[in-house]
């Protein structure tokens, strides 16, 4: 019979035999305790065989220590798994065999603590401390005492629970992480947000969240199949992680929805930049299973404590901001503001009204001239839909077109625009062209060539006078259907223009095969081209060179200042469209210009590009010393505003402009004309993601609450109405 591994103790005794003679299992141990080692009884012999068989089965192992915690016995097979022979471990402190519990994130009493307290323990999960050995063991131990009651050491057992442990970790991972992308799932990120907000509220810290939704993702699933959609989602997750960095703060909520937590961030300038970076990154083309895919993203942003202090409030408000971003044309971000609640209600009302707008004759077309850059002669116009709502007046297509897309009304609306534009153009003298925008939804409809042919036949318009403007998003997947659609449209004899070129979807590949006649350079490149240090001019020059090589015309959109016009002329852009020549005009006004068969427009506008100015009628407060004045903001730019409501304010007077919702901007009066003042902001405002402006920072509700508690009410400097400058 082979005996368990013999280990000589530091005191020179026969430790292995002694350990076995004292036993390892409860009653079995008591039965063989006290037997002489040299002459084991039959019962002892059988017990030893049982112990040996158990060890050799690999189901478990045994160990013992002296009073100082040093190993006196350990199963040899387990010692080898730890990279040692049992003899090499003799005298080693038992606790050194395992990693400290804290390093594994376990919440339990540590093995050294239990040894110090001489406490028993059962199936304590411990991980091997030996390099290259990542096993987990469930270790049990019982303290042993001699006849005098003195502590004599431990005896115990262990089991390999690595497989069980990994299975539990996998189950935990599935419960907390998205199985497709590896990101945190909805449950995980919700708990993280709740914990973060609770801790930050106590410390009066801010925390922002972003909700984002992929644009046109459904087209990927419909066109390439769900496996391709899954592969695309993985790439989206990778791009998000590159921008955000912290994997635990990025989650996939489900479908094509994601959430990001940004602790200690309330600077809306930085948040806007991050949101813009996310949109730009996710809008870059993807390669999925050999196909080229193009999607986009919309982002909603909410910030605690300004927009809510609970996770439910913050998520709900971020979702409202996301809804507004998608409703503004997609590919945008929006910050939450309280007026979005009313805007959401208004939007739902507009959707109901839009369904009957065509039948009631509320839709109109206006035409913006497209001008030859060198001759100033109008060569064509772009048809732009306008909705003349009976109660709300003119509604921008930036508002109602996304509604039409979501409500599946874009095909009907698009067909009406096409037919009406052809009908109007047929009445114009000469050969001036008309451009009509075709949405990706229209382009994907196989009936489009038939509808175009029908409109041309019904109106008698020559096909070469109709120009269809198509965005790059129609190249989703580079499918054969796309190629067939281009062939069918060109077969009708119409012209094709690539709209919004350079917005992030661009690829030279499709320009080689798609039969475009014109490239329209996106206005975002034009607006920044005259700014010192901008590379936009070089990009425009490259686009022009590319178009000339492919024998295409170019049109620069959004030209508003004379310096912009001079630049695009120098860069060789063939056509220009923008306010520097004309806004969109109705059919009647257009006819008055084209009767002479030649329409030339002299450019007019500001000499240089300036910050966008937003005309408005917005109530606000102007705070000076201990007084707050009610004012109206007539226009607003990033660097200043034009206000009225205070009389004869000296130049140089400093105000704090209160825009509401904690938005305060320090401003200095630079112009003063009786009851009107032009003020310059000390810190520039930032984009709100929807073409508007907002302050970079807001006054924290924590500070307002502290001030209120300190003064027993609202602070006098912000809300007093007496003044030296009265507008009454």
Image (cartoon, helix red, strand yellow):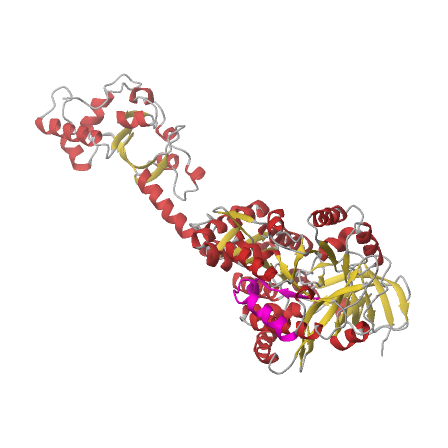
Number of callouts: 0
The magenta stretch is: 434-459
Residue 254 visible, this orientation: no
Residue at position x 56%, y 66% from top?
Answer: 448
Residue at position x 53%, y 57% from top?
Answer: 484
Q: Quadrant of residue 433?
A: bottom right
Left/right placement of residue 416 relative to residue 620 reads left
39 in the magenta segment: no
Give 682 or 154, whichever is nearer the viewer. 682
Task: Point out residue 176 in the picture as x, y percentages from the top left corner.
Answer: 43, 51
Prevalent SS, magenta region: helix
Name the residue at the top extreme: 12
Give 211 or 256, whichever is nearer the viewer. 256
Left/right placement of residue 127 relative to residue 631 reads left
Give 110 or 399, whichever is nearer the viewer. 399
Residue 73 visible, this orientation: yes
Task: Point out residue 320 in the picture as x, y percentages from the top left corner.
Answer: 57, 66
Left/right placement of residue 596 relative to residue 36 reads right
Task: Point out residue 652 in the picture as x, y percentages from the top left corner.
Answer: 89, 61
Quadrant of the frame with the N terminus: top left
Task: Point out residue 697 in the picture as x, y percentages from the top left corner.
Answer: 70, 57
452 in the magenta segment: yes
Name the residue at the left extreme: 42
Q: Is residue 610 above or below residue 599?
A: above
Quadrant of the frame with the C terminus: bottom right
Q: Is residue 157 above or below residue 639?
A: above
Give 472 or 34, whichever is nearer the viewer. 472
Q: Quadrant of residue 656?
A: bottom right
Q: Quadrant of residue 420?
A: bottom right
């Amino acid at each position: 019979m082979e005996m368990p591994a013999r280990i000589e103790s530091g005191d020179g005794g026969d430790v292995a035999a002694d350990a076995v003679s004292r036993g390892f299992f409860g009653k079995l141990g008591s039965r063989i305790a006290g037997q002489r080692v040299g002459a084991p009884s039959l019962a002892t012999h059988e017990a030893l065989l049982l112990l040996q068989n158990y060890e050799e089965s690999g189901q478990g192992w045994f160990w013992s220590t002296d009073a100082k915690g040093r190993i006196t016995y350990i199963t040899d097979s387990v010692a080898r798994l730890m990279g040692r022979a049992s003899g090499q471990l003799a005298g080693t402190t038992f606790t050194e065999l395992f990693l400290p519990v804290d390093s594994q994130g376990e919440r339990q009493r540590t093995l050294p603590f239990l040894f110090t307290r001489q406490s028993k323990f059962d199936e304590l999960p411990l991980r091997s401390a030996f390099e290259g050995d990542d096993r987990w063991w469930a270790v049990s131990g019982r303290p042993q005492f001699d006849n005098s009651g003195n502590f004599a050491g431990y005896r115990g057992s262990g089991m390999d629970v690595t497989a069980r442990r990994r299975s539990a970790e996998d189950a935990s991972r599935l419960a907390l992480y998205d199985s497709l992308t590896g990101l945190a799932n909805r449950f995980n990120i919700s708990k993280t947000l709740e914990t973060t907000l609770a801790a930050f509220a106590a410390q009066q810290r801010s925390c922002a969240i972003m909700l984002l939704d992929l644009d046109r993702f459904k087209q990927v699933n419909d066109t390439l199949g769900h496996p391709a959609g899954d592969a695309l989602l993985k790439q989206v997750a990778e791009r998000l992680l590159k921008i955000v960095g912290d994997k635990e703060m990025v989650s996939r909520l489900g479908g094509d929805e994601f959430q990001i937590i940004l602790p200690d961030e309330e600077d809306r300038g930085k948040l806007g930049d991050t949101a813009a970076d996310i949109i730009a990154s996710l809008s870059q083309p993807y390669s999925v299973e050999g196909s080229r895919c193009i999607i986009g993203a919309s982002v909603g942003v909410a910030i605690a404590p300004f927009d809510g202090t609970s996770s439910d409030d913050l998520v709900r408000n971020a979702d409202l901001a996301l809804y507004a971003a998608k409703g503004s044309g997609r590919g945008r971000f929006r910050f939450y503001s309280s007026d979005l609640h009313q805007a959401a209600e208004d939007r739902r009302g507009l959707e109901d009204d839009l369904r009957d707008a065509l039948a009631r004759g509320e839709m109109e077309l206006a035409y913006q001239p497209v001008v030859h850059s060198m001759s100033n002669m109008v060569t064509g116009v772009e048809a732009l839909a306008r909705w003349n709502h009976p109660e709300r007046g003119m509604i921008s297509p930036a508002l109602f077109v996304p509604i039409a897309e979501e409500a599946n009304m874009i095909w009907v609306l698009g067909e009406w625009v096409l037919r009406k534009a052809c009908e109007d153009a047929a009445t114009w003298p000469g050969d001036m062209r008309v451009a009509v925008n075709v949405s990706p939804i229209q382009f994907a409809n196989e009936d489009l060539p038939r509808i175009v042919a029908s409109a041309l036949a019904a109106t008698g318009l020559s096909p070469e006078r109709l120009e269809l403007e198509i965005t790059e998003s129609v190249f989703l997947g580079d499918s054969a259907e796309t190629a067939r659609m281009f062939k069918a449209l060109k077969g009708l004899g119409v012209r094709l223009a690539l709209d919004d070129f350079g917005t992030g979807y661009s690829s030279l590949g499709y320009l080689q095969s798609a039969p475009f006649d014109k490239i329209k350079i996106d206005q975002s490149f034009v607006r920044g081209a005259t700014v010192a240090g901008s590379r936009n001019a070089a990009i425009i020059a490259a686009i022009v060179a590319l178009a000339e090589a492919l024998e295409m015309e170019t049109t620069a959109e959004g030209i508003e200042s004379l310096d912009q016009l001079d630049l695009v002329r120098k860069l060789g852009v063939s056509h220009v469209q923008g306010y520097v020549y004309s806004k969109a005009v109705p059919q009647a006004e257009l006819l008055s210009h084209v009767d002479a068969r030649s329409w030339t427009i002299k450019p007019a506008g500001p000499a240089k590009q300036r910050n966008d100015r937003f005309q408005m009628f917005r109530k606000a407060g102007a705070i000076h010393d201990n007084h707050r004045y009610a004012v109206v903001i007539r226009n607003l730019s990033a660097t200043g505003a034009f206000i009225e409501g205070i009389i004869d304010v000296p130049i140089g007077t400093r105000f704090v402009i209160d825009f509401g919702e904690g938005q305060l901007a320090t401003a200095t009066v630079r112009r003063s004309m009786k009851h009107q003042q032009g003020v310059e902001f000390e810190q520039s405002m930032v984009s709100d993601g929807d073409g508007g402006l907002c302050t970079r920072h807001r006054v924290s509700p924590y500070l307002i609450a502290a001030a209120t508690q300190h003064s027993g009410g609202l602070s006098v400097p912000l809300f007093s109405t007496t003044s030296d400058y009265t507008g009454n």
